[in-house]
């Protein structure tokens, strides 16, 4: 999830996909990986071997949607230490 300053970018992806569907429903819409890469390019986040997804300027790691993932990862770390 993007921080509030960058959330509007998601609407651009939605508009792009809607445009593709209007042009020809057979066109393949970009997948999530393509969206993430385009988002990184748009906000100036590193996209090569130097990528750093922990930069809070570009990512909101505390987004509620990520809570289940955080819990899963914590449980995996807890099980590995046991």
Image (spheres, rainbow, N blue to C red):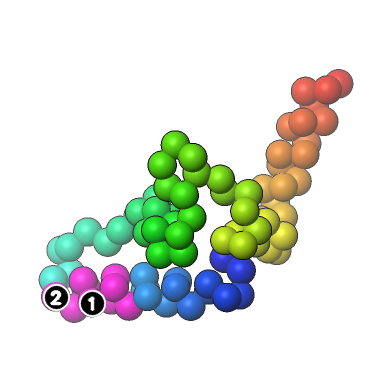
Gap between marks 1 and 2, in whole Å? 6 Å
Displayed quadrant of residue 11: bottom left
Q: Main secondary structure of the magenta part?
A: helix
The residue labelled by disc 2 is: 23
In the image, residue 46 lies in the stretch drawn in magenta? no
Relative to 39, residue 20 above or below: below
Work out whether 1 lies above or below 71. below
Q: Position of residue 6 (x, y in %)?
A: 53, 72
Is the C-beta separation of discs 1 and 2 under 8 Å?
A: yes
Magenta includes 20?
yes
Task: Residue at 46%, 49% (x, y): give it.
Answer: 46
Q: Secondary structure at mark 2?
A: helix
Where is residue 40 shown, x and y percent of the image?
A: 44, 57
The residue indicated by pointer 1 is 19
Res. 39 in view = no
**Badge 1: few (under 14), some or many (20 or more) residues near its Cα, within 10 Å?**
few
Quarter of the image where the N terminus is located: bottom right
| Label drawn at residue 68 | none
Extent of the magenta region: 15-23
The image position of residue 56, as x and y in percent, is 65, 58
Q: Residues within 10 Å of mark 2 (few under 14, many from 20)?
A: few
Percent position of residue 27, x then y: 17, 63
Task: Determine the residue positioned at 13% across, 71% down.
Answer: 24
Q: Quadrant of the C terminus?
A: top right
Q: Which corner quadrant of the image does residue 58 belong to? A: bottom right
State the residue at coordinates (72%, 55%): 67
Q: Residue at x 83, y 22 (%)?
A: 81
**Label 1: element kind:** helix
């Amino acid at each position: 999830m993007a921080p509030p300053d960058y959330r509007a970018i998601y609407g651009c992806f939605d508009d792009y996909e809607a445009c593709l569907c209007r042009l020809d429903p057979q066109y393949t819409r970009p997948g999530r990986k393509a969206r993430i890469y385009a988002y990184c390019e748009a906000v100036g986040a590193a996209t090569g071997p130097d990528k750093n997804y922990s930069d809070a300027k570009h990512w909101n790691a505390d987004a509620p949607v990520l809570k289940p993932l955080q819990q899963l990862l914590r449980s995996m770390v807890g099980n590995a230490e046991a």
